[in-house]
Amino acid sequence: MAVVPQASEKWFGRAFFALVASIPVYLYGVVVSGMLTPVAADKLCQGVEDRVLDSADPIRGRLFPLSMKCMWEGGTSTEKVPPLVNPLIFGLLALSVALVVLGVRALRRQRREACTAG
């Protein structure tokens, strides 16, 4: 006999899936931006020939929200993390939280129905 999962279990499972789905997106941003690459700043930021890196602070990086910027003289910067990575991460995290809320609501509803039925 197959066990049918309760509604709350479905919501919690989906929340876990959304949370786990954010991990490869984050890792993609880390790898593509070059955060894990032990190279010099001029190698990491190459591709723009007419710009000179800021000598005091050539690279600024953050792990959350994910950011890896090449700082140029004159105060401009170039972001190395693809533009869709952070919105996808935050969207999946927000979806996970919303699904947990729905799971808690379903669990409370199940308990309330069990109390009134029994």
Image (tube, helix red, strand yellow):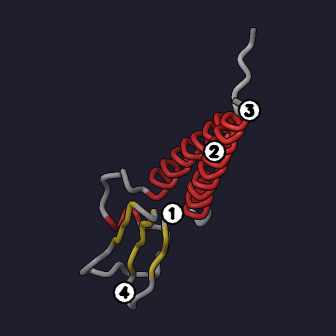
Q: Residues within 10 Å of mark 2 (few under 14, many from 20)?
A: few
Amino acid type, mark 2: Arg
Query: Mark 1 vs mark 3: which is more N-terminal?
Result: 1
- The residues bearing labels 4 and 3 have C-alpha atoms spaced at a distance of 71 Å
- The residues bearing labels 2 and 3 have C-alpha atoms spaced at a distance of 14 Å
Q: Residue at x 30, y 52 (%)?
A: 38
Amino acid type, mark 1: Val
Give x and y (percent) for residue 99.
Answer: 64, 49
- Tell me the tag on residue 81: 1
Circle 2: element type: helix
Query: Mark 4 vs mark 3: which is more N-terminal?
Result: 4
Circle 1: element type: loop
Circle 3: element type: helix
Q: Residue at x 37, y 81 (%)?
A: 52
Using the image as rendered, state which of residue 68 and residue 73 is in the foreground. 68
- The residues bearing labels 1 and 3 have C-alpha atoms spaced at a distance of 54 Å
Q: Are marks 2 and 3 in contact (CB under 8 Å)?
A: no
Q: Residue at x 66, y 50 (%)?
A: 102
Q: In the orientation shown, which residue stands out farthest toward the top?
A: 1
- Write down the residue under mark 4: 73
Query: Mark 2 vs mark 1: which is more N-terminal?
Result: 1
- Write down the residue under mark 2: 108
Query: Mark 2 vs mark 4: which is more N-terminal?
Result: 4
Q: Residues within 10 Å of mark 3 (few under 14, many from 20)?
A: few
Q: Quarter-wise, where is residue 43 in the image? A: bottom left
Q: Quarter-wise, where is residue 117 in the image? A: top right
Q: Residue at x 61, y 54 (%)?
A: 92
Where's the C terminus, which quadrant? top right
